[in-house]
């Protein structure tokens, strides 16, 4: 299963190199360091809010996972910088990823 | 390495009008040849087209429309810094000896597909540039204690300066209150904090020293080039308050030109959003960190056009593929002292800063008489 296959099912995974264990982001089949193949880690990952702003009633946050992965996610309640969050919902819509955190 | 000079230029007005991309490319190219009727098109070795438009084979198309049969003809796309990337490619063709004269034309339509980088899925559903600009603005304001009113001054200054640029999209001046009361896009960004996509084109002709001196008494030399790409995705930016690619590209360009930043007399910098101008000024070394906004404010109060004399992207409009070329034309005009009411005080050395996708890639050029 690819990252996008898992994401389409609502499962957020983190790609990791099978050889050197480097976390690869954006998701890729190959490691950008040793060129080895990657596999997907499936856990309930915790992320940290790096920065956020708000559009209408929704907050959008830059969230960091595993110290190296950063992504933009929607949040309904008021965030704080350095707040620890989890992905509550994710998926794909018309080819684009979406992530919600709580 | 042989010297490379800019010997001619042409431009179209920047508008919201509906035109075919081929027609836009031809407009500024034709303007260049009308202004410089002595140029022998048979001497043009390469035609480079800078655009994010999806139409195909645009360089051969432009060549045919303009009556040129170049040896080298191709397009260059790198989102918002396609223009200066094309100039760097032209420089390389000439300095390597593969070409003696290169036409670079950039054009874009108001509905350019280059405005959104679909690949960058790490932005989730927040792919529009207003979201990275909001994150930059929030971080920058918090880090340095800057207010929204202070950031609004960049927009006020650049719209004001654009009124002296007959090709600019902006036809109106604004107050800080106007910016603060303009449409709220996010908690950290108002409509008048943003540059606007538009339709426009710009062309320049570069030549080797031997050819340049045959055609003009006032060639402007490209003496410094710096480029750096740190990533493609916004979320890979390690800092949200400075621009790493700009720092590196600026240092490279200044080193190549044997200048330091205090010797730059006039500059066009990539103010895609108001927060970008102070961040760029700091990243290039014009000011210390957190003091870029003071520089913009002081220049505005003194009516000094040193930074973004044509109105920057906020005042001029932002036709992506044409922007870097239009910025370069402005610095050429400044150095040739033909900038009319925008003319700064006797500049000898100028700088262009052009970047892409939340500063993941930057190009800096240094120009001299």
Image: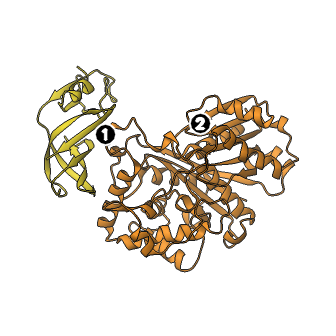
Chain colours: A yellow, B orange
The residue depicted at 12 percent of the width and 32 percent of the height is A43
Q: Position of residue B42 (x, y in %)?
A: 84, 34
Dividing the picture into quarters, in which one does residue B173 lie? bottom right
Check disc 1 and report the residue beneath it: B122
| Pick the front one: B74 or B290 | B74
Check disc 2 and report the residue beneath it: B76
Can the viewer see residue A49 in this picture?
yes
Marks 1 and 2, the one that precedes in the sequence: 2
| Pick the front one: B96 or A50 | A50
Q: Is residue B42 above or below residue B264?
A: above
The residue depicted at 17 percent of the width and 51 percent of the height is A76
| Pick the front one: B254 or B298 | B298
Q: Is residue B215 above or below residue A14?
A: below
Instruction: Say left or right for B68 vs B118.
Output: right
Of helix, strand and loop, which one carries label 2?
Answer: strand
| Quadrant in which the C terminus of chain B is drawn | bottom right
| Quadrant in which the N terminus of chain B is drawn | top right
């Amino acid at each position: 299963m690819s990252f996008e296959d898992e994401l389409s099912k609502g499962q957020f995974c983190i790609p990791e190199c099978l050889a050197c264990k480097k976390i690869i982001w954006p998701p890729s089949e190959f490691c950008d360091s040793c060129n080895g193949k990657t596999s997907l880690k499936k856990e309930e990952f915790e992320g940290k809010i790096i920065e956020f702003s708000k559009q209408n009633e929704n907050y959008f946050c830059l969230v960091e996972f595993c110290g190296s992965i950063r992504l933009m996610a929607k949040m309904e309640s008021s965030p704080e910088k350095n707040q620890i969050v989890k992905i509550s919902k994710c998926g794909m819509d018309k080819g684009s990823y979406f992530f919600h955190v709580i | 390495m042989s010297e490379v000079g800019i010997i001619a230029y042409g431009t179209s007005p920047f508008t919201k009008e509906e035109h075919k991309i081929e027609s836009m490319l031809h407009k500024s190219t034709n303007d260049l040849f009308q202004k410089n009727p002595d140029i022998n098109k048979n001497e043009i070795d390469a035609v480079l087209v800078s655009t994010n438009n999806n139409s195909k084979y645009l360089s051969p198309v432009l060549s045919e429309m303009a009556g040129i049969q170049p040896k080298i003809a191709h397009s260059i796309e790198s989102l918002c810094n396609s223009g200066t990337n094309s100039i760097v490619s032209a420089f390389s063709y000439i300095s390597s000896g593969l070409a003696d004269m290169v036409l670079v034309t950039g054009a874009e339509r108001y509905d350019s597909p280059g405005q959104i980088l679909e690949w960058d899925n790490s932005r989730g559903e927040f792919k529009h540039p207003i979201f990275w600009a909001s994150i930059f603005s929030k971080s920058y304001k918090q880090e340095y204690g800057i207010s929204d009113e202070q950031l609004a001054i960049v927009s006020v200054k650049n719209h004001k300066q654009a009124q002296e640029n007959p090709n600019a999209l902006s036809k109106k001046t604004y107050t800080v209150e106007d910016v603060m009361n303009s449409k709220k896009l996010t908690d950290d960004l108002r409509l008048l904090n943003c540059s606007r996509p538009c339709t426009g084109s710009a062309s320049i002709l570069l030549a080797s020293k031997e050819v340049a001196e045959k055609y003009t008494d006032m060639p402007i030399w490209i003496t410094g080039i710096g480029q750096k790409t740190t990533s493609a995705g916004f979320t890979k930016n390690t800092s949200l308050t400075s621009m790493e690619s700009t720092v590196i590209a600026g240092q490279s360009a200044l080193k190549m030109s044997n200048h330091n930043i205090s010797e730059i007399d006039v500059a066009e910098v990539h103010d895609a959003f108001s927060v970008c101008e102070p961040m760029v000024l700091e990243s290039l070394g014009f000011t210390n960190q957190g003091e870029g906004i003071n520089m913009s404010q002081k220049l505005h109060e003194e009516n000094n056009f040193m930074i973004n004399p044509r109105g920057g992207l906020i005042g001029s409009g932002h036709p992506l593929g044409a922007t870097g070329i239009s910025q370069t034309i402005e610095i050429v005009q400044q150095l040739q002292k033909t900038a009319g009411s925008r003319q700064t005080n006797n500049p000898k050395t100028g700088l262009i800063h052009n970047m892409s996708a939340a500063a993941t890639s930057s190009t800096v050029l240094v120009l001299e008489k």
